Amino acid sequence: MSVPPMMPAADPKRPTLDSLVGDSASPEALSRLSRASRPARRAAGKKAGKASPSSRVVLLLQAALKAIAAETYGEASQLALKALKLDERNGLSWHILAIAQEKAGDLAQAFSAYEAAVRLLADETTVAFDLGRLAHRLGYLEIAEKLLSRYLASHPGNVEAINNLACALRDQNRYDEAIELLRDALGANPAEPILWNSLGTVLSERGDAAQSLPFYDEALRLEPGFYKARYNRANVRMSLGEPLLAIADIDEALTGVTAPMEIATMKMAKALTQMAAGQLDQAFDTYEARLDPALADAVTFAPGGTRWAPGDDLKGRTLLVYGEQGLGDEILFANLLGDTLEALGPNGTLILSVEHRLVPLFQRSYPQARVVRHRSVRHLGRLYRAADLPDPVPNIDLWTPMASLFRQFRPRAEAFPTTPGFLTPDPDRVAHWRAVLAEAGPGLNAGVLWKSLLMKGSRVRVYSPFEMWRPVLSVPGVRFVNLQYGDATAELEAARAAGLEIWTPPGIDLKDDLDDLGALCAALDVVIGPATATTNIAAACGTRVWMTSTAEAWSGFGPNGYLCYPTVEVFRTAAVGEWGEVMDRIASALSAEVAQRHAA
Protein backbone atom coordinates (compact mmCIF):
# COMPACT_ATOMS: atom_id res chain seq x y z
CA MET A 1 0.00 0.00 0.00
CA SER A 2 1.93 3.02 -1.24
CA VAL A 3 1.28 6.53 0.10
CA PRO A 4 2.06 9.99 -1.28
CA PRO A 5 4.82 12.14 0.25
CA MET A 6 4.07 14.47 3.13
CA MET A 7 3.25 18.05 2.18
CA PRO A 8 5.04 21.05 3.71
CA ALA A 9 3.30 23.20 6.28
CA ALA A 10 0.77 25.61 4.88
CA ASP A 11 -0.28 29.08 5.97
CA PRO A 12 -1.60 29.03 9.52
CA LYS A 13 -5.36 28.52 9.51
CA ARG A 14 -7.74 27.72 12.33
CA PRO A 15 -6.40 24.34 13.47
CA THR A 16 -8.96 21.58 13.74
CA LEU A 17 -9.26 18.66 16.09
CA ASP A 18 -10.33 15.69 14.05
CA SER A 19 -13.63 14.06 14.93
CA LEU A 20 -12.08 10.61 14.76
CA VAL A 21 -12.76 8.21 17.58
CA GLY A 22 -11.03 5.10 18.83
CA ASP A 23 -7.87 4.66 20.88
CA SER A 24 -5.51 1.83 19.99
CA ALA A 25 -4.01 2.09 23.49
CA SER A 26 -7.24 2.13 25.50
CA PRO A 27 -7.43 -0.32 28.42
CA GLU A 28 -9.94 -2.40 26.44
CA ALA A 29 -7.68 -2.52 23.38
CA LEU A 30 -4.61 -3.47 25.43
CA SER A 31 -6.59 -6.15 27.26
CA ARG A 32 -7.69 -7.63 23.95
CA LEU A 33 -4.10 -7.68 22.67
CA SER A 34 -2.94 -9.33 25.89
CA ARG A 35 -5.55 -12.05 25.48
CA ALA A 36 -4.48 -12.55 21.88
CA SER A 37 -0.99 -13.53 23.03
CA ARG A 38 -2.11 -16.00 25.70
CA PRO A 39 -2.64 -19.03 23.45
CA ALA A 40 0.88 -18.66 22.16
CA ARG A 41 2.12 -18.23 25.73
CA ARG A 42 0.41 -21.45 26.91
CA ALA A 43 1.81 -23.36 23.95
CA ALA A 44 5.26 -22.04 24.66
CA GLY A 45 4.94 -22.93 28.34
CA LYS A 46 4.48 -26.62 27.56
CA LYS A 47 8.04 -26.83 26.28
CA ALA A 48 10.57 -27.86 28.90
CA GLY A 49 14.04 -26.51 29.36
CA LYS A 50 15.35 -23.30 27.90
CA ALA A 51 12.72 -20.75 26.80
CA SER A 52 11.93 -21.03 23.12
CA PRO A 53 12.08 -18.01 20.79
CA SER A 54 8.27 -17.97 20.64
CA SER A 55 7.96 -17.80 24.43
CA ARG A 56 10.52 -14.98 24.55
CA VAL A 57 8.45 -13.11 21.95
CA VAL A 58 5.36 -13.48 24.12
CA LEU A 59 7.18 -12.20 27.20
CA LEU A 60 8.53 -9.21 25.28
CA LEU A 61 5.08 -8.36 23.94
CA GLN A 62 3.50 -8.62 27.38
CA ALA A 63 6.17 -6.25 28.69
CA ALA A 64 5.57 -3.90 25.73
CA LEU A 65 1.83 -3.80 26.50
CA LYS A 66 2.59 -2.93 30.13
CA ALA A 67 4.91 -0.14 28.94
CA ILE A 68 2.16 1.26 26.69
CA ALA A 69 -0.26 1.20 29.61
CA ALA A 70 2.33 3.10 31.65
CA GLU A 71 2.73 5.59 28.75
CA THR A 72 6.44 4.80 28.34
CA TYR A 73 6.09 4.49 24.61
CA GLY A 74 9.79 4.54 23.73
CA GLU A 75 10.38 1.53 25.98
CA ALA A 76 7.37 -0.22 24.42
CA SER A 77 8.76 0.35 20.92
CA GLN A 78 12.13 -1.11 21.89
CA LEU A 79 10.51 -4.21 23.39
CA ALA A 80 8.38 -4.76 20.28
CA LEU A 81 11.44 -4.34 18.07
CA LYS A 82 13.28 -6.98 20.12
CA ALA A 83 10.34 -9.33 19.58
CA LEU A 84 10.50 -8.68 15.83
CA LYS A 85 14.19 -9.56 15.78
CA LEU A 86 13.17 -12.98 17.06
CA ASP A 87 10.24 -13.33 14.64
CA GLU A 88 9.79 -10.67 11.97
CA ARG A 89 6.63 -12.43 10.70
CA ASN A 90 4.77 -11.96 13.96
CA GLY A 91 1.81 -9.71 13.09
CA LEU A 92 0.98 -9.04 16.74
CA SER A 93 4.48 -7.64 17.28
CA TRP A 94 4.00 -5.25 14.35
CA HIS A 95 0.61 -4.19 15.72
CA ILE A 96 1.99 -3.44 19.18
CA LEU A 97 4.98 -1.60 17.67
CA ALA A 98 2.58 0.49 15.59
CA ILE A 99 0.53 1.44 18.66
CA ALA A 100 3.63 2.45 20.61
CA GLN A 101 4.97 4.54 17.72
CA GLU A 102 1.61 6.20 17.12
CA LYS A 103 1.27 7.16 20.77
CA ALA A 104 4.85 8.48 20.75
CA GLY A 105 4.00 10.70 17.76
CA ASP A 106 6.11 8.82 15.21
CA LEU A 107 3.18 8.67 12.81
CA ALA A 108 5.01 7.83 9.60
CA GLN A 109 6.83 4.92 11.27
CA ALA A 110 3.59 3.80 12.90
CA PHE A 111 1.86 3.77 9.52
CA SER A 112 4.49 1.38 8.11
CA ALA A 113 4.18 -0.88 11.15
CA TYR A 114 0.39 -0.98 10.86
CA GLU A 115 0.76 -1.87 7.17
CA ALA A 116 2.95 -4.84 8.09
CA ALA A 117 0.41 -5.92 10.72
CA VAL A 118 -2.46 -5.73 8.22
CA ARG A 119 -0.57 -7.95 5.77
CA LEU A 120 0.29 -10.54 8.42
CA LEU A 121 -3.01 -10.46 10.29
CA ALA A 122 -5.35 -10.61 7.32
CA ASP A 123 -8.30 -11.77 9.44
CA GLU A 124 -7.74 -9.27 12.28
CA THR A 125 -9.94 -6.33 11.21
CA THR A 126 -9.12 -4.29 14.32
CA VAL A 127 -5.75 -3.54 12.77
CA ALA A 128 -7.53 -2.20 9.70
CA PHE A 129 -9.58 0.09 11.94
CA ASP A 130 -6.45 1.44 13.68
CA LEU A 131 -4.62 1.90 10.39
CA GLY A 132 -7.63 3.61 8.85
CA ARG A 133 -7.73 6.13 11.68
CA LEU A 134 -3.99 6.83 11.37
CA ALA A 135 -4.20 7.07 7.56
CA HIS A 136 -6.81 9.76 8.03
CA ARG A 137 -4.59 11.68 10.46
CA LEU A 138 -1.79 11.59 7.90
CA GLY A 139 -4.09 12.81 5.13
CA TYR A 140 -4.32 9.53 3.21
CA LEU A 141 -8.08 9.78 2.93
CA GLU A 142 -8.77 7.23 0.18
CA ILE A 143 -6.72 4.64 2.07
CA ALA A 144 -8.62 5.47 5.26
CA GLU A 145 -11.94 5.07 3.45
CA LYS A 146 -11.03 1.63 2.10
CA LEU A 147 -9.77 0.34 5.45
CA LEU A 148 -12.78 1.60 7.39
CA SER A 149 -15.18 0.18 4.82
CA ARG A 150 -13.41 -3.14 5.21
CA TYR A 151 -13.85 -2.99 8.98
CA LEU A 152 -17.54 -2.10 8.67
CA ALA A 153 -18.11 -5.06 6.37
CA SER A 154 -17.31 -7.35 9.29
CA HIS A 155 -18.69 -5.04 12.01
CA PRO A 156 -21.91 -3.59 10.50
CA GLY A 157 -23.42 -0.76 12.50
CA ASN A 158 -20.24 -0.07 14.50
CA VAL A 159 -20.67 3.55 15.58
CA GLU A 160 -16.96 4.39 15.80
CA ALA A 161 -16.24 3.05 12.31
CA ILE A 162 -19.27 4.83 10.84
CA ASN A 163 -18.15 8.06 12.47
CA ASN A 164 -14.60 7.77 11.14
CA LEU A 165 -15.75 6.79 7.66
CA ALA A 166 -18.02 9.84 7.56
CA CYS A 167 -15.02 12.01 8.51
CA ALA A 168 -13.00 10.50 5.64
CA LEU A 169 -15.82 11.27 3.21
CA ARG A 170 -16.16 14.79 4.61
CA ASP A 171 -12.48 15.54 4.15
CA GLN A 172 -12.72 14.43 0.52
CA ASN A 173 -15.49 17.06 0.11
CA ARG A 174 -18.07 14.29 -0.33
CA TYR A 175 -20.44 16.00 2.03
CA ASP A 176 -23.74 14.49 0.86
CA GLU A 177 -22.42 10.94 1.31
CA ALA A 178 -21.13 11.78 4.79
CA ILE A 179 -24.45 13.36 5.80
CA GLU A 180 -26.45 10.36 4.58
CA LEU A 181 -24.18 7.94 6.45
CA LEU A 182 -24.44 9.92 9.71
CA ARG A 183 -28.19 10.47 9.46
CA ASP A 184 -28.78 6.75 9.06
CA ALA A 185 -26.50 6.06 12.03
CA LEU A 186 -28.28 8.67 14.17
CA GLY A 187 -31.61 7.07 13.33
CA ALA A 188 -30.36 3.92 15.04
CA ASN A 189 -28.20 5.68 17.70
CA PRO A 190 -29.82 9.05 18.58
CA ALA A 191 -28.01 9.29 21.93
CA GLU A 192 -24.48 9.09 20.46
CA PRO A 193 -22.88 12.56 20.86
CA ILE A 194 -19.96 11.70 18.56
CA LEU A 195 -22.36 11.34 15.64
CA TRP A 196 -24.05 14.69 16.35
CA ASN A 197 -20.63 16.35 16.57
CA SER A 198 -19.40 14.82 13.31
CA LEU A 199 -22.58 15.83 11.49
CA GLY A 200 -21.95 19.36 12.72
CA THR A 201 -18.41 19.26 11.29
CA VAL A 202 -19.70 18.08 7.90
CA LEU A 203 -22.19 20.94 7.70
CA SER A 204 -19.67 23.57 8.84
CA GLU A 205 -17.03 22.29 6.42
CA ARG A 206 -19.61 22.45 3.63
CA GLY A 207 -20.17 26.10 4.47
CA ASP A 208 -23.43 25.76 6.41
CA ALA A 209 -21.97 27.23 9.60
CA ALA A 210 -25.18 28.52 11.16
CA GLN A 211 -26.97 25.23 10.38
CA SER A 212 -24.23 23.26 12.12
CA LEU A 213 -24.66 24.93 15.54
CA PRO A 214 -27.73 22.91 16.65
CA PHE A 215 -25.81 19.69 16.09
CA TYR A 216 -22.94 20.81 18.33
CA ASP A 217 -25.49 21.99 20.89
CA GLU A 218 -27.16 18.57 20.88
CA ALA A 219 -23.79 16.81 21.28
CA LEU A 220 -23.08 19.03 24.30
CA ARG A 221 -26.54 18.46 25.74
CA LEU A 222 -25.93 14.72 25.61
CA GLU A 223 -22.38 15.08 26.96
CA PRO A 224 -21.60 18.49 28.52
CA GLY A 225 -17.93 17.52 28.90
CA PHE A 226 -17.50 16.79 25.17
CA TYR A 227 -14.66 19.28 24.67
CA LYS A 228 -14.18 18.55 20.97
CA ALA A 229 -17.77 19.54 20.26
CA ARG A 230 -17.31 22.73 22.31
CA TYR A 231 -14.09 23.54 20.45
CA ASN A 232 -15.74 22.86 17.09
CA ARG A 233 -18.59 25.16 18.10
CA ALA A 234 -15.98 27.84 18.87
CA ASN A 235 -14.63 27.58 15.33
CA VAL A 236 -18.13 27.96 13.90
CA ARG A 237 -18.80 30.98 16.12
CA MET A 238 -15.60 32.55 14.81
CA SER A 239 -16.68 31.95 11.21
CA LEU A 240 -19.98 33.69 12.06
CA GLY A 241 -18.11 36.76 13.34
CA GLU A 242 -18.52 36.05 17.06
CA PRO A 243 -14.90 35.97 18.30
CA LEU A 244 -15.64 36.68 21.97
CA LEU A 245 -18.09 33.78 22.18
CA ALA A 246 -15.53 31.64 20.36
CA ILE A 247 -12.81 32.51 22.89
CA ALA A 248 -15.16 31.67 25.76
CA ASP A 249 -15.86 28.25 24.23
CA ILE A 250 -12.15 27.57 23.70
CA ASP A 251 -11.31 28.57 27.27
CA GLU A 252 -13.96 26.22 28.62
CA ALA A 253 -12.83 23.40 26.33
CA LEU A 254 -9.25 23.86 27.54
CA THR A 255 -10.32 23.04 31.09
CA GLY A 256 -11.20 19.49 30.01
CA VAL A 257 -8.19 18.75 27.82
CA THR A 258 -5.16 16.73 28.91
CA ALA A 259 -3.54 15.54 25.66
CA PRO A 260 -0.63 17.87 24.72
CA MET A 261 -1.64 17.90 21.03
CA GLU A 262 -5.18 18.97 21.84
CA ILE A 263 -4.01 21.67 24.25
CA ALA A 264 -1.62 23.08 21.65
CA THR A 265 -4.27 22.94 18.93
CA MET A 266 -6.80 24.83 21.02
CA LYS A 267 -4.24 27.44 22.07
CA MET A 268 -3.29 27.97 18.44
CA ALA A 269 -6.95 28.51 17.53
CA LYS A 270 -7.35 30.87 20.48
CA ALA A 271 -4.38 32.93 19.27
CA LEU A 272 -5.86 33.32 15.79
CA THR A 273 -9.22 34.24 17.31
CA GLN A 274 -7.57 36.85 19.53
CA MET A 275 -5.81 38.26 16.46
CA ALA A 276 -9.10 38.47 14.57
CA ALA A 277 -10.68 40.22 17.56
CA GLY A 278 -7.75 42.67 17.85
CA GLN A 279 -6.64 41.44 21.29
CA LEU A 280 -3.00 41.89 20.33
CA ASP A 281 -1.71 42.35 23.88
CA GLN A 282 -2.60 38.67 24.44
CA ALA A 283 -2.68 37.17 20.96
CA PHE A 284 1.03 37.09 20.14
CA ASP A 285 1.94 35.48 23.45
CA THR A 286 -0.73 32.81 22.86
CA TYR A 287 0.56 32.40 19.30
CA GLU A 288 3.77 30.87 20.64
CA ALA A 289 1.69 27.66 20.75
CA ARG A 290 2.46 27.29 17.03
CA LEU A 291 5.96 26.16 18.05
CA ASP A 292 4.77 23.49 20.50
CA PRO A 293 6.18 20.13 19.32
CA ALA A 294 2.84 18.56 20.25
CA LEU A 295 1.25 20.45 17.34
CA ALA A 296 1.23 18.35 14.18
CA ASP A 297 2.47 21.16 11.89
CA ALA A 298 4.92 22.74 14.34
CA VAL A 299 8.27 23.63 12.77
CA THR A 300 11.53 22.78 14.50
CA PHE A 301 14.10 25.47 13.68
CA ALA A 302 17.84 24.94 13.62
CA PRO A 303 18.94 27.31 16.39
CA GLY A 304 21.66 29.92 16.20
CA GLY A 305 22.93 31.19 19.52
CA THR A 306 20.25 31.84 22.16
CA ARG A 307 16.52 31.97 21.45
CA TRP A 308 15.45 35.63 21.52
CA ALA A 309 12.85 36.68 24.10
CA PRO A 310 10.98 39.98 24.49
CA GLY A 311 13.10 42.51 26.32
CA ASP A 312 16.44 41.12 25.10
CA ASP A 313 18.78 43.92 24.08
CA LEU A 314 19.43 43.72 20.33
CA LYS A 315 21.80 46.66 19.98
CA GLY A 316 25.04 45.57 18.31
CA ARG A 317 24.02 41.89 18.26
CA THR A 318 23.80 39.41 15.39
CA LEU A 319 20.22 38.17 15.06
CA LEU A 320 19.02 35.29 12.88
CA VAL A 321 15.34 35.67 11.93
CA TYR A 322 13.44 32.82 10.30
CA GLY A 323 10.53 33.35 7.93
CA GLU A 324 7.78 30.96 8.94
CA GLN A 325 4.42 29.44 8.13
CA GLY A 326 3.35 29.96 4.52
CA LEU A 327 4.72 32.28 1.89
CA GLY A 328 2.10 34.96 2.46
CA ASP A 329 2.82 34.98 6.18
CA GLU A 330 6.55 35.44 5.67
CA ILE A 331 5.64 38.66 3.84
CA LEU A 332 2.98 39.71 6.37
CA PHE A 333 5.26 39.28 9.38
CA ALA A 334 8.06 41.20 7.63
CA ASN A 335 6.14 44.35 8.56
CA LEU A 336 8.39 44.69 11.62
CA LEU A 337 11.80 44.16 10.03
CA GLY A 338 12.41 47.90 9.87
CA ASP A 339 11.90 48.12 13.64
CA THR A 340 14.19 45.13 14.12
CA LEU A 341 17.01 46.76 12.13
CA GLU A 342 16.59 49.97 14.11
CA ALA A 343 16.84 48.02 17.37
CA LEU A 344 20.02 46.28 16.16
CA GLY A 345 21.60 49.64 15.36
CA PRO A 346 24.47 50.37 12.97
CA ASN A 347 26.75 47.84 14.65
CA GLY A 348 24.21 45.04 14.71
CA THR A 349 23.62 42.43 12.02
CA LEU A 350 20.35 40.95 10.78
CA ILE A 351 20.52 37.58 9.04
CA LEU A 352 17.15 37.02 7.44
CA SER A 353 16.24 33.51 6.29
CA VAL A 354 13.25 33.40 3.94
CA GLU A 355 11.68 31.25 1.21
CA HIS A 356 14.11 31.19 -1.74
CA ARG A 357 11.70 32.99 -4.11
CA LEU A 358 11.63 35.97 -1.75
CA VAL A 359 15.40 36.46 -1.43
CA PRO A 360 15.88 39.07 -4.24
CA LEU A 361 12.89 41.17 -3.16
CA PHE A 362 13.85 41.10 0.53
CA GLN A 363 17.52 41.79 -0.15
CA ARG A 364 16.65 44.90 -2.17
CA SER A 365 14.19 46.03 0.52
CA TYR A 366 16.64 45.52 3.40
CA PRO A 367 20.14 46.13 2.02
CA GLN A 368 21.56 46.34 5.57
CA ALA A 369 20.55 42.71 6.18
CA ARG A 370 22.10 39.49 4.96
CA VAL A 371 19.19 37.65 3.27
CA VAL A 372 19.53 33.89 2.76
CA ARG A 373 17.14 31.10 1.90
CA HIS A 374 15.85 28.56 4.34
CA ARG A 375 15.48 24.85 3.64
CA SER A 376 12.77 22.64 5.08
CA VAL A 377 12.55 18.88 5.26
CA ARG A 378 10.07 16.34 6.60
CA HIS A 379 11.44 13.56 8.77
CA LEU A 380 9.27 11.05 10.62
CA GLY A 381 6.28 13.32 10.20
CA ARG A 382 8.01 16.41 11.61
CA LEU A 383 9.00 19.56 9.71
CA TYR A 384 12.52 20.89 10.24
CA ARG A 385 13.85 24.21 8.94
CA ALA A 386 17.41 25.50 8.70
CA ALA A 387 18.99 28.66 7.30
CA ASP A 388 21.32 28.32 4.33
CA LEU A 389 24.08 30.24 6.09
CA PRO A 390 27.23 31.48 4.32
CA ASP A 391 30.60 29.81 4.78
CA PRO A 392 32.22 30.52 7.17
CA VAL A 393 29.14 30.51 9.37
CA PRO A 394 28.85 33.85 11.21
CA ASN A 395 28.81 34.00 14.98
CA ILE A 396 25.09 34.36 15.79
CA ASP A 397 24.08 35.77 19.16
CA LEU A 398 20.29 35.34 19.00
CA TRP A 399 17.69 33.70 16.79
CA THR A 400 13.91 33.81 16.51
CA PRO A 401 11.02 32.89 14.25
CA MET A 402 9.85 36.13 12.65
CA ALA A 403 6.33 36.29 14.12
CA SER A 404 7.68 36.09 17.68
CA LEU A 405 9.06 39.62 17.26
CA PHE A 406 5.47 40.93 17.20
CA ARG A 407 5.36 40.42 20.98
CA GLN A 408 7.81 43.28 21.37
CA PHE A 409 7.26 45.49 18.33
CA ARG A 410 3.48 45.17 17.70
CA PRO A 411 1.74 44.69 21.07
CA ARG A 412 -1.17 46.99 20.11
CA ALA A 413 -2.74 48.50 17.01
CA GLU A 414 -1.06 51.89 17.56
CA ALA A 415 2.38 50.25 17.19
CA PHE A 416 1.82 49.47 13.49
CA PRO A 417 3.28 51.98 11.00
CA THR A 418 0.86 53.88 8.76
CA THR A 419 3.25 54.41 5.84
CA PRO A 420 2.27 52.37 2.76
CA GLY A 421 4.51 49.45 1.90
CA PHE A 422 7.72 48.08 3.33
CA LEU A 423 9.09 46.09 0.38
CA THR A 424 10.90 47.73 -2.55
CA PRO A 425 10.13 46.34 -6.03
CA ASP A 426 12.70 46.56 -8.82
CA PRO A 427 12.23 50.11 -10.24
CA ASP A 428 13.38 49.10 -13.73
CA ARG A 429 10.84 46.28 -13.87
CA VAL A 430 8.10 48.56 -12.52
CA ALA A 431 8.87 50.95 -15.41
CA HIS A 432 8.81 48.00 -17.83
CA TRP A 433 5.36 46.87 -16.72
CA ARG A 434 3.98 50.40 -16.78
CA ALA A 435 5.15 50.71 -20.37
CA VAL A 436 3.60 47.36 -21.31
CA LEU A 437 0.28 48.37 -19.75
CA ALA A 438 0.37 51.79 -21.42
CA GLU A 439 0.85 50.15 -24.84
CA ALA A 440 -2.41 48.28 -24.31
CA GLY A 441 -4.32 51.57 -24.17
CA PRO A 442 -6.05 53.69 -21.54
CA GLY A 443 -8.10 52.31 -18.70
CA LEU A 444 -7.89 51.29 -15.07
CA ASN A 445 -5.47 48.39 -14.60
CA ALA A 446 -6.83 45.95 -12.02
CA GLY A 447 -5.00 42.75 -11.15
CA VAL A 448 -7.31 39.87 -10.20
CA LEU A 449 -6.90 36.45 -8.61
CA TRP A 450 -9.48 34.24 -6.97
CA LYS A 451 -8.04 31.06 -5.48
CA SER A 452 -5.15 29.36 -3.72
CA LEU A 453 -3.17 26.34 -4.90
CA LEU A 454 -4.56 24.45 -1.89
CA MET A 455 -8.35 24.25 -2.30
CA LYS A 456 -9.46 21.46 0.02
CA GLY A 457 -11.83 21.08 2.93
CA SER A 458 -12.68 24.21 4.89
CA ARG A 459 -10.20 26.31 2.88
CA VAL A 460 -12.66 26.34 -0.04
CA ARG A 461 -15.08 28.60 1.84
CA VAL A 462 -12.41 31.31 2.18
CA TYR A 463 -12.43 31.89 -1.59
CA SER A 464 -15.27 33.18 -3.69
CA PRO A 465 -16.27 30.79 -6.51
CA PHE A 466 -15.05 32.17 -9.83
CA GLU A 467 -18.57 32.36 -11.28
CA MET A 468 -19.37 34.94 -8.57
CA TRP A 469 -16.83 37.35 -10.12
CA ARG A 470 -19.02 38.21 -13.12
CA PRO A 471 -20.28 41.57 -11.71
CA VAL A 472 -16.68 42.67 -11.13
CA LEU A 473 -15.33 41.48 -14.45
CA SER A 474 -18.24 43.17 -16.29
CA VAL A 475 -17.33 46.71 -15.15
CA PRO A 476 -16.46 48.72 -18.31
CA GLY A 477 -13.33 50.83 -18.56
CA VAL A 478 -11.17 48.33 -16.66
CA ARG A 479 -8.34 46.19 -17.98
CA PHE A 480 -8.33 43.06 -15.85
CA VAL A 481 -4.84 41.61 -15.47
CA ASN A 482 -4.50 37.93 -14.58
CA LEU A 483 -2.43 37.43 -11.42
CA GLN A 484 -3.69 33.92 -10.73
CA TYR A 485 -0.80 31.49 -10.25
CA GLY A 486 -1.26 27.80 -10.95
CA ASP A 487 -3.59 26.40 -13.59
CA ALA A 488 -6.30 28.95 -14.34
CA THR A 489 -7.12 27.70 -17.83
CA ALA A 490 -10.70 26.65 -17.06
CA GLU A 491 -11.61 29.97 -15.44
CA LEU A 492 -9.98 32.08 -18.17
CA GLU A 493 -11.78 30.12 -20.88
CA ALA A 494 -15.09 30.42 -19.03
CA ALA A 495 -14.61 34.19 -18.78
CA ARG A 496 -13.76 34.45 -22.46
CA ALA A 497 -16.82 32.42 -23.40
CA ALA A 498 -18.95 34.86 -21.39
CA GLY A 499 -17.42 37.81 -23.24
CA LEU A 500 -15.20 38.83 -20.34
CA GLU A 501 -11.52 39.41 -20.98
CA ILE A 502 -8.75 38.80 -18.44
CA TRP A 503 -5.38 39.71 -19.92
CA THR A 504 -2.43 37.51 -18.97
CA PRO A 505 0.86 39.46 -18.84
CA PRO A 506 3.57 37.94 -21.06
CA GLY A 507 6.94 36.65 -19.93
CA ILE A 508 6.33 36.24 -16.20
CA ASP A 509 6.01 33.18 -13.99
CA LEU A 510 3.30 34.27 -11.55
CA LYS A 511 4.10 31.47 -9.14
CA ASP A 512 7.88 31.48 -8.94
CA ASP A 513 9.16 34.89 -10.15
CA LEU A 514 8.00 36.78 -7.08
CA ASP A 515 10.45 39.65 -7.55
CA ASP A 516 8.99 40.49 -10.95
CA LEU A 517 5.50 39.87 -9.57
CA GLY A 518 6.11 42.61 -7.01
CA ALA A 519 7.11 44.99 -9.82
CA LEU A 520 4.02 44.08 -11.86
CA CYS A 521 1.74 44.66 -8.87
CA ALA A 522 3.41 48.04 -8.24
CA ALA A 523 2.57 49.05 -11.82
CA LEU A 524 -1.14 48.29 -11.37
CA ASP A 525 -3.79 50.66 -10.06
CA VAL A 526 -5.37 48.08 -7.78
CA VAL A 527 -5.15 44.36 -7.01
CA ILE A 528 -8.34 42.47 -6.13
CA GLY A 529 -8.42 39.05 -4.50
CA PRO A 530 -8.28 36.97 -1.33
CA ALA A 531 -5.36 36.79 1.10
CA THR A 532 -2.66 34.91 -0.84
CA ALA A 533 1.06 35.35 -1.40
CA THR A 534 0.25 37.62 -4.36
CA THR A 535 -2.02 40.03 -2.51
CA ASN A 536 0.46 40.11 0.37
CA ILE A 537 3.28 41.02 -2.03
CA ALA A 538 1.16 43.70 -3.67
CA ALA A 539 0.21 45.26 -0.33
CA ALA A 540 3.76 45.01 1.04
CA CYS A 541 4.97 46.89 -2.08
CA GLY A 542 2.48 49.67 -1.34
CA THR A 543 -0.09 48.85 -4.05
CA ARG A 544 -3.75 49.37 -3.27
CA VAL A 545 -5.38 46.00 -2.58
CA TRP A 546 -9.07 45.21 -2.29
CA MET A 547 -9.00 42.09 -0.16
CA THR A 548 -11.91 39.66 -0.18
CA SER A 549 -12.26 38.12 3.25
CA THR A 550 -14.42 36.15 5.64
CA ALA A 551 -15.33 36.97 9.23
CA GLU A 552 -12.87 34.40 10.58
CA ALA A 553 -9.80 35.92 8.88
CA TRP A 554 -7.09 36.70 11.44
CA SER A 555 -4.27 38.34 9.46
CA GLY A 556 -5.76 41.83 9.56
CA PHE A 557 -5.10 41.75 13.35
CA GLY A 558 -8.51 43.25 14.08
CA PRO A 559 -12.05 43.44 12.78
CA ASN A 560 -11.37 46.48 10.59
CA GLY A 561 -8.73 46.96 7.91
CA TYR A 562 -5.28 45.37 7.73
CA LEU A 563 -2.84 46.73 10.28
CA CYS A 564 0.25 45.50 8.42
CA TYR A 565 -0.94 47.03 5.14
CA PRO A 566 -2.44 50.55 5.22
CA THR A 567 -3.24 50.32 1.48
CA VAL A 568 -5.59 47.34 1.94
CA GLU A 569 -9.37 47.79 1.91
CA VAL A 570 -11.22 44.73 3.19
CA PHE A 571 -14.42 43.48 1.57
CA ARG A 572 -15.70 41.04 4.17
CA THR A 573 -18.60 38.61 3.89
CA ALA A 574 -21.48 39.22 6.27
CA ALA A 575 -21.93 35.46 6.66
CA VAL A 576 -20.22 32.29 5.44
CA GLY A 577 -20.60 31.84 1.69
CA GLU A 578 -22.35 35.16 1.02
CA TRP A 579 -20.00 36.24 -1.75
CA GLY A 580 -22.62 37.79 -4.03
CA GLU A 581 -22.99 40.89 -1.88
CA VAL A 582 -19.19 41.23 -1.60
CA MET A 583 -18.73 41.07 -5.36
CA ASP A 584 -21.50 43.63 -5.92
CA ARG A 585 -19.74 46.02 -3.51
CA ILE A 586 -16.43 45.58 -5.32
CA ALA A 587 -18.11 46.14 -8.70
CA SER A 588 -19.70 49.36 -7.40
CA ALA A 589 -16.37 50.57 -6.00
CA LEU A 590 -14.67 49.77 -9.30
CA SER A 591 -17.34 51.61 -11.29
CA ALA A 592 -16.92 54.64 -9.03
CA GLU A 593 -13.16 54.51 -9.56
CA VAL A 594 -13.59 54.51 -13.35
CA ALA A 595 -16.09 57.38 -13.18
CA GLN A 596 -13.72 59.40 -11.01
CA ARG A 597 -10.93 58.89 -13.56
CA HIS A 598 -13.14 60.03 -16.40
CA ALA A 599 -14.19 63.10 -14.43
CA ALA A 600 -10.55 63.95 -13.75
Image (cartoon, rainbow, N blue to C red):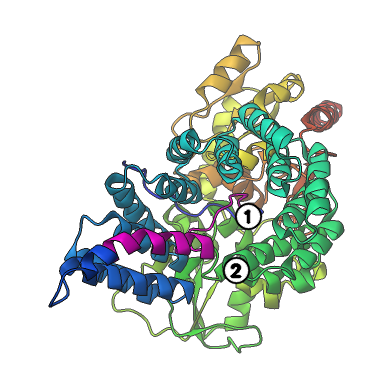
Quadrant of the image for the C terminus? top right
Q: Nearer the viewer, mark 1 or mark 2?
A: 2
User: Amino acid under label 2?
Assistant: Ala
The image quadrant that residue 417 belongs to is bottom right
Residue 130: image x %, image y %? Answer: 45, 51
**563 lies left or right of 424:** right
Q: Secondary structure at mark 2?
A: loop
User: Amino acid under label 1?
Assistant: Leu
Residue 595: image x %, image y %? Answer: 85, 26
Q: Which residue matches tag 2? A: 259
Q: Is residue 32 visible?
A: yes
Q: Which residue matches tag 1? A: 17
- Membership of 285 in magenta stretch: no
Observer-nearest residue: 176 or 356?
176
Q: Is residue 429 above or below residue 64?
A: above
- Magenta residues? 16-41
- Membership of 19 in magenta stretch: yes
The image quadrant that residue 101 belongs to is bottom left
Q: Earlier in the sequence, mark 1 or mark 2?
A: 1
Residue 281: image x %, image y %? Answer: 78, 73
Quadrant of the image for the N terminus? top left
Q: Is residue 217 above or below residue 363?
A: above
Could you classify mark 2 by the number of other residues whose Cα lies within 10 Å: few (under 14), some (14-19), or many (20 or more)? Answer: few
Q: Residue at x 66, y 45 (%)?
A: 531
Badge number at residue 578: none
